[in-house]
Image: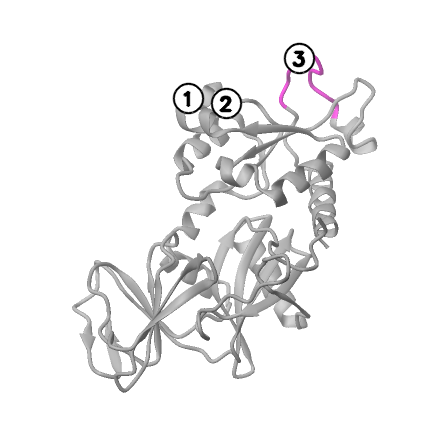
Protein backbone atom coordinates (compact mmCIF):
# COMPACT_ATOMS: atom_id res chain seq x y z
CA UNK A 1 0.00 0.00 0.00
CA UNK A 2 2.78 2.43 0.88
CA UNK A 3 4.32 1.98 -2.57
CA UNK A 4 0.93 2.71 -4.17
CA UNK A 5 0.51 5.92 -2.19
CA UNK A 6 4.05 7.03 -2.93
CA UNK A 7 3.43 6.21 -6.57
CA UNK A 8 0.37 8.45 -6.55
CA UNK A 9 2.39 11.26 -4.96
CA UNK A 10 5.12 10.83 -7.58
CA UNK A 11 2.74 10.76 -10.52
CA UNK A 12 0.76 13.68 -9.13
CA UNK A 13 3.97 15.71 -8.83
CA UNK A 14 4.86 14.75 -12.39
CA UNK A 15 1.47 15.91 -13.67
CA UNK A 16 1.72 19.20 -11.76
CA UNK A 17 5.14 19.98 -13.12
CA UNK A 18 4.22 19.23 -16.72
CA UNK A 19 0.98 21.20 -17.04
CA UNK A 20 0.38 24.79 -17.97
CA UNK A 21 1.02 27.50 -15.42
CA UNK A 22 4.03 25.74 -13.91
CA UNK A 23 6.91 28.13 -13.11
CA UNK A 24 9.98 27.87 -15.30
CA UNK A 25 12.83 25.74 -13.92
CA UNK A 26 15.47 27.71 -12.04
CA UNK A 27 18.37 28.46 -14.45
CA UNK A 28 21.50 26.69 -13.23
CA UNK A 29 24.65 24.94 -14.37
CA UNK A 30 25.21 22.61 -16.07
CA UNK A 31 21.64 22.21 -17.33
CA UNK A 32 20.56 25.82 -17.80
CA UNK A 33 16.95 26.72 -18.57
CA UNK A 34 14.66 24.37 -20.44
CA UNK A 35 11.91 24.95 -23.02
CA UNK A 36 8.71 23.90 -21.25
CA UNK A 37 7.37 22.43 -24.48
CA UNK A 38 10.24 19.97 -24.38
CA UNK A 39 9.48 19.11 -20.78
CA UNK A 40 5.81 18.49 -21.54
CA UNK A 41 6.75 16.27 -24.44
CA UNK A 42 9.30 14.32 -22.43
CA UNK A 43 8.63 15.12 -18.79
CA UNK A 44 11.85 14.23 -17.03
CA UNK A 45 14.59 13.74 -19.60
CA UNK A 46 14.90 16.48 -22.19
CA UNK A 47 17.59 16.45 -24.84
CA UNK A 48 20.08 18.26 -22.59
CA UNK A 49 19.48 15.90 -19.64
CA UNK A 50 17.35 18.23 -17.50
CA UNK A 51 15.83 16.85 -14.32
CA UNK A 52 13.41 18.67 -12.03
CA UNK A 53 15.03 19.68 -8.75
CA UNK A 54 12.57 18.88 -5.96
CA UNK A 55 13.38 20.48 -2.61
CA UNK A 56 12.31 18.85 0.66
CA UNK A 57 12.22 21.33 3.52
CA UNK A 58 11.19 19.95 6.90
CA UNK A 59 12.83 19.17 10.21
CA UNK A 60 15.48 16.45 10.07
CA UNK A 61 13.35 14.09 12.16
CA UNK A 62 10.74 14.14 9.38
CA UNK A 63 13.28 14.28 6.56
CA UNK A 64 14.92 11.05 7.69
CA UNK A 65 11.73 9.18 8.61
CA UNK A 66 10.96 5.87 6.92
CA UNK A 67 7.93 7.15 4.93
CA UNK A 68 9.93 10.11 3.60
CA UNK A 69 12.89 7.90 2.66
CA UNK A 70 10.59 5.61 0.68
CA UNK A 71 8.95 8.57 -1.06
CA UNK A 72 12.38 9.99 -1.99
CA UNK A 73 13.45 6.64 -3.45
CA UNK A 74 10.36 6.56 -5.62
CA UNK A 75 10.85 10.14 -6.81
CA UNK A 76 14.49 9.50 -7.66
CA UNK A 77 13.49 6.59 -9.86
CA UNK A 78 11.28 9.05 -11.77
CA UNK A 79 14.38 11.20 -12.38
CA UNK A 80 13.65 13.89 -9.85
CA UNK A 81 16.78 15.38 -8.38
CA UNK A 82 16.16 15.61 -4.63
CA UNK A 83 17.48 18.64 -2.76
CA UNK A 84 17.40 18.27 1.02
CA UNK A 85 17.16 21.34 3.27
CA UNK A 86 18.75 20.06 6.48
CA UNK A 87 18.37 21.68 9.90
CA UNK A 88 21.81 23.29 9.72
CA UNK A 89 20.74 25.11 6.56
CA UNK A 90 17.22 26.04 7.68
CA UNK A 91 18.11 27.25 11.14
CA UNK A 92 21.51 28.87 10.66
CA UNK A 93 21.82 30.16 7.10
CA UNK A 94 20.04 33.11 5.47
CA UNK A 95 17.51 32.14 2.84
CA UNK A 96 19.74 33.64 0.14
CA UNK A 97 22.11 30.73 0.81
CA UNK A 98 19.49 28.01 0.72
CA UNK A 99 19.76 25.69 -2.30
CA UNK A 100 17.73 26.27 -5.46
CA UNK A 101 14.86 24.05 -6.54
CA UNK A 102 12.03 24.04 -9.10
CA UNK A 103 9.38 22.58 -6.77
CA UNK A 104 9.23 22.43 -3.01
CA UNK A 105 7.78 20.07 -0.42
CA UNK A 106 7.80 22.12 2.79
CA UNK A 107 5.87 21.54 5.99
CA UNK A 108 6.24 22.51 9.59
CA UNK A 109 6.63 20.67 12.86
CA UNK A 110 8.08 21.68 16.21
CA UNK A 111 11.06 23.98 15.66
CA UNK A 112 10.42 24.56 11.95
CA UNK A 113 11.33 28.14 10.84
CA UNK A 114 8.12 28.86 8.96
CA UNK A 115 8.83 32.57 8.48
CA UNK A 116 12.20 31.80 6.87
CA UNK A 117 10.66 29.18 4.61
CA UNK A 118 8.03 31.72 3.50
CA UNK A 119 10.81 34.24 2.80
CA UNK A 120 12.63 31.64 0.69
CA UNK A 121 9.50 30.99 -1.38
CA UNK A 122 9.01 34.74 -1.88
CA UNK A 123 12.63 35.03 -3.03
CA UNK A 124 12.94 31.98 -5.32
CA UNK A 125 9.32 31.25 -6.36
CA UNK A 126 9.46 27.43 -6.47
CA UNK A 127 6.25 25.54 -7.18
CA UNK A 128 4.95 24.66 -3.68
CA UNK A 129 3.19 21.34 -3.16
CA UNK A 130 1.79 22.60 0.17
CA UNK A 131 1.17 26.34 0.41
CA UNK A 132 3.30 27.68 3.26
CA UNK A 133 1.20 30.75 3.98
CA UNK A 134 -1.87 28.56 4.50
CA UNK A 135 0.08 26.41 6.91
CA UNK A 136 -0.19 29.32 9.34
CA UNK A 137 -3.93 28.64 9.44
CA UNK A 138 -3.20 25.11 10.65
CA UNK A 139 -1.43 26.52 13.71
CA UNK A 140 -4.66 28.06 15.02
CA UNK A 141 -7.67 25.83 15.56
CA UNK A 142 -9.99 28.86 15.43
CA UNK A 143 -8.86 29.60 11.88
CA UNK A 144 -9.12 25.93 10.89
CA UNK A 145 -12.75 25.79 12.00
CA UNK A 146 -13.55 29.10 10.29
CA UNK A 147 -12.03 27.87 7.04
CA UNK A 148 -14.03 24.65 7.24
CA UNK A 149 -17.27 26.50 7.95
CA UNK A 150 -16.58 29.01 5.16
CA UNK A 151 -16.47 26.01 2.82
CA UNK A 152 -19.73 24.53 4.16
CA UNK A 153 -17.97 21.64 5.88
CA UNK A 154 -19.55 20.39 9.11
CA UNK A 155 -17.61 20.84 12.34
CA UNK A 156 -18.75 19.94 15.86
CA UNK A 157 -20.92 22.46 17.68
CA UNK A 158 -18.42 24.61 19.53
CA UNK A 159 -17.65 27.92 21.20
CA UNK A 160 -14.35 29.80 21.44
CA UNK A 161 -12.94 31.31 24.62
CA UNK A 162 -10.11 33.69 23.72
CA UNK A 163 -8.74 37.13 24.50
CA UNK A 164 -11.88 38.79 23.12
CA UNK A 165 -14.37 36.75 25.14
CA UNK A 166 -16.26 37.68 28.32
CA UNK A 167 -15.49 35.52 31.36
CA UNK A 168 -16.44 31.87 30.97
CA UNK A 169 -19.34 30.71 33.13
CA UNK A 170 -18.92 27.20 34.53
CA UNK A 171 -21.59 25.03 36.13
CA UNK A 172 -21.46 21.38 37.13
CA UNK A 173 -22.74 20.04 33.80
CA UNK A 174 -22.09 22.83 31.30
CA UNK A 175 -20.13 25.93 30.43
CA UNK A 176 -21.33 29.15 28.84
CA UNK A 177 -18.81 30.56 26.38
CA UNK A 178 -19.60 33.84 24.63
CA UNK A 179 -23.24 33.33 25.55
CA UNK A 180 -23.33 29.81 24.09
CA UNK A 181 -24.08 26.85 26.32
CA UNK A 182 -21.99 23.70 25.81
CA UNK A 183 -23.22 20.72 27.82
CA UNK A 184 -21.07 17.94 29.20
CA UNK A 185 -19.67 15.73 27.94
CA UNK A 186 -17.62 18.27 26.05
CA UNK A 187 -14.14 18.53 24.59
CA UNK A 188 -11.69 21.27 25.57
CA UNK A 189 -9.07 21.98 22.88
CA UNK A 190 -6.22 24.48 23.10
CA UNK A 191 -6.43 27.11 20.40
CA UNK A 192 -2.86 26.37 19.34
CA UNK A 193 -2.76 23.62 16.72
CA UNK A 194 0.61 22.51 18.11
CA UNK A 195 -0.80 21.79 21.57
CA UNK A 196 -2.23 18.26 21.66
CA UNK A 197 -3.35 18.27 25.30
CA UNK A 198 -7.07 17.84 24.68
CA UNK A 199 -9.37 17.13 27.63
CA UNK A 200 -12.86 15.60 27.80
CA UNK A 201 -15.13 16.48 30.72
CA UNK A 202 -17.98 14.19 31.80
CA UNK A 203 -21.29 15.17 33.49
CA UNK A 204 -22.43 14.61 37.06
CA UNK A 205 -18.90 15.03 38.45
CA UNK A 206 -17.64 11.93 36.65
CA UNK A 207 -14.19 13.33 35.99
CA UNK A 208 -12.03 14.20 33.01
CA UNK A 209 -10.00 12.31 30.44
CA UNK A 210 -6.76 13.91 29.23
CA UNK A 211 -5.77 13.06 25.66
CA UNK A 212 -2.19 13.45 24.50
CA UNK A 213 0.23 12.25 21.84
CA UNK A 214 1.06 8.58 22.28
CA UNK A 215 3.54 7.75 25.03
CA UNK A 216 4.37 4.09 24.74
CA UNK A 217 1.02 2.29 24.70
CA UNK A 218 -0.98 5.15 26.22
CA UNK A 219 -2.86 7.96 24.51
CA UNK A 220 -5.05 9.22 27.37
CA UNK A 221 -5.41 9.18 31.14
CA UNK A 222 -8.59 9.39 33.20
CA UNK A 223 -8.80 11.63 36.29
CA UNK A 224 -11.98 10.89 38.27
CA UNK A 225 -11.72 13.94 40.55
CA UNK A 226 -10.98 16.57 37.90
CA UNK A 227 -14.18 18.38 36.97
CA UNK A 228 -13.31 22.04 36.41
CA UNK A 229 -12.02 23.44 33.12
CA UNK A 230 -8.61 24.99 32.59
CA UNK A 231 -8.20 28.72 33.14
CA UNK A 232 -4.59 29.07 32.02
CA UNK A 233 -5.09 29.89 28.34
CA UNK A 234 -7.52 30.06 25.41
CA UNK A 235 -9.63 27.09 24.40
CA UNK A 236 -12.31 25.78 22.10
CA UNK A 237 -15.20 23.99 23.82
CA UNK A 238 -17.14 21.58 21.65
CA UNK A 239 -19.78 18.91 22.02
CA UNK A 240 -18.42 15.42 22.44
CA UNK A 241 -19.67 13.34 19.52
CA UNK A 242 -20.33 9.59 19.91
CA UNK A 243 -18.41 7.74 17.18
CA UNK A 244 -18.67 4.07 18.20
CA UNK A 245 -15.18 4.33 19.66
CA UNK A 246 -13.18 5.07 16.51
CA UNK A 247 -11.50 7.97 14.73
CA UNK A 248 -11.14 8.14 10.94
CA UNK A 249 -7.86 9.45 9.57
CA UNK A 250 -8.03 10.69 5.97
CA UNK A 251 -5.03 11.24 3.69
CA UNK A 252 -5.25 13.07 0.37
CA UNK A 253 -2.81 13.30 -2.52
CA UNK A 254 -4.13 16.10 -4.66
CA UNK A 255 -7.87 16.81 -4.65
CA UNK A 256 -8.93 13.62 -6.43
CA UNK A 257 -7.40 10.87 -4.26
CA UNK A 258 -8.23 10.11 -0.63
CA UNK A 259 -7.35 7.14 1.55
CA UNK A 260 -8.99 6.58 4.92
CA UNK A 261 -8.40 4.30 7.86
CA UNK A 262 -9.85 3.93 11.34
CA UNK A 263 -8.20 3.51 14.71
CA UNK A 264 -9.52 3.06 18.22
CA UNK A 265 -10.25 6.53 19.58
CA UNK A 266 -7.99 7.60 22.46
CA UNK A 267 -11.14 8.61 24.34
CA UNK A 268 -12.14 4.94 24.76
CA UNK A 269 -9.62 3.73 27.32
CA UNK A 270 -6.28 5.29 26.36
CA UNK A 271 -4.72 1.94 25.42
CA UNK A 272 -3.06 1.93 22.00
CA UNK A 273 -3.80 -1.22 20.00
CA UNK A 274 -0.67 -2.46 18.26
CA UNK A 275 0.16 -5.00 15.59
CA UNK A 276 2.76 -7.76 15.89
CA UNK A 277 5.29 -5.29 14.44
CA UNK A 278 4.42 -2.78 17.21
CA UNK A 279 2.64 -0.31 14.91
CA UNK A 280 -0.66 1.27 15.87
CA UNK A 281 -3.46 -0.94 14.58
CA UNK A 282 -5.52 0.66 11.83
CA UNK A 283 -8.31 -0.58 9.58
CA UNK A 284 -9.10 0.50 6.00
CA UNK A 285 -12.28 2.53 5.63
CA UNK A 286 -14.41 2.98 2.53
CA UNK A 287 -15.41 6.61 2.19
CA UNK A 288 -18.91 7.55 1.08
CA UNK A 289 -19.29 9.74 -1.99
CA UNK A 290 -20.01 12.88 0.02
CA UNK A 291 -16.97 12.16 2.24
CA UNK A 292 -14.78 12.00 -0.85
CA UNK A 293 -16.18 15.36 -1.87
CA UNK A 294 -15.38 16.73 1.59
CA UNK A 295 -11.80 15.50 1.19
CA UNK A 296 -11.50 17.23 -2.19
CA UNK A 297 -12.84 20.50 -0.81
CA UNK A 298 -10.50 20.42 2.21
CA UNK A 299 -7.50 19.72 0.01
CA UNK A 300 -8.35 22.69 -2.21
CA UNK A 301 -9.46 25.11 0.53
CA UNK A 302 -6.32 24.71 2.62
CA UNK A 303 -4.03 24.56 -0.45
CA UNK A 304 -2.23 21.52 0.90
CA UNK A 305 -1.51 19.14 -1.96
CA UNK A 306 -0.66 16.31 0.44
CA UNK A 307 -2.92 16.65 3.46
CA UNK A 308 -4.27 14.69 6.41
CA UNK A 309 -7.36 15.39 8.49
CA UNK A 310 -9.79 13.70 10.85
CA UNK A 311 -13.41 12.65 10.30
CA UNK A 312 -15.93 11.90 13.02
CA UNK A 313 -18.92 9.83 11.93
CA UNK A 314 -21.69 10.52 14.40
CA UNK A 315 -25.47 10.24 14.29
CA UNK A 316 -25.51 9.67 10.53
CA UNK A 317 -23.34 12.70 9.71
CA UNK A 318 -19.64 13.28 9.08
CA UNK A 319 -17.82 16.06 10.89
CA UNK A 320 -14.26 17.34 10.46
CA UNK A 321 -12.49 18.01 13.75
CA UNK A 322 -8.87 18.60 12.71
CA UNK A 323 -6.73 19.40 9.65
CA UNK A 324 -3.04 18.54 9.88
CA UNK A 325 -1.43 19.54 6.58
CA UNK A 326 1.30 17.29 5.18
CA UNK A 327 0.66 13.80 6.44
CA UNK A 328 1.43 10.33 5.12
CA UNK A 329 0.05 7.03 6.31
CA UNK A 330 2.09 5.49 9.09
CA UNK A 331 1.73 2.47 11.30
CA UNK A 332 -0.61 0.64 8.93
CA UNK A 333 -0.30 -3.15 8.60
CA UNK A 334 -0.82 -2.66 4.87
CA UNK A 335 2.42 -0.72 4.60
CA UNK A 336 5.08 -2.37 2.50
CA UNK A 337 8.46 -2.67 4.15
Answer above or below: position of 268 versus 24: below
- Dividing the picture into quadrants, the one containing residue 260 is bottom right
Residue 154 can be seen, yes or no: yes
Q: Are marks 2 and 3 in contact (CB under 8 Å)?
A: no
Regarding mark 1 in the picture, which secondary structure is present there?
loop
In the image, residue 297 sits, relative to residue 41, either above or below, namely below
User: Residue 249 has which mark?
Assistant: none
Q: Position of residue 313 (x, y in %)?
A: 54, 76
Residue at the disc numbered 1: 94
Asked if marks 1 and 2 touch (Cβ < 8 Å), the reply is yes
Q: Secondary structure at mark 3?
A: loop
As drawn, the label of residue 29 is 3
Residue at 59%, 58% (x, y): give it: 279
User: Which residues are the magenta region?
Assistant: 26-35
Q: Residue at x 62, y 59 (%)?
A: 296
As for residue 155 lying within the magenta part, the answer is: no
Amino acid sequence: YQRRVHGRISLWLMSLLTTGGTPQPVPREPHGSVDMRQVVGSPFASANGFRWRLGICCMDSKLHSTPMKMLVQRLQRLQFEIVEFDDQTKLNKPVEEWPLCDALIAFGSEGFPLAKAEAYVALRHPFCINDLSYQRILLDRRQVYRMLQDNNICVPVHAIQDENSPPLVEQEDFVIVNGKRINKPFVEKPISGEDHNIWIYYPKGRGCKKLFRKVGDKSSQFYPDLNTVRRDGYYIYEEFLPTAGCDIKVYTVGPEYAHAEARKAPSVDGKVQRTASNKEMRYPVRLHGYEKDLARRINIAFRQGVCGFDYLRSNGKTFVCDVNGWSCVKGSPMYSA
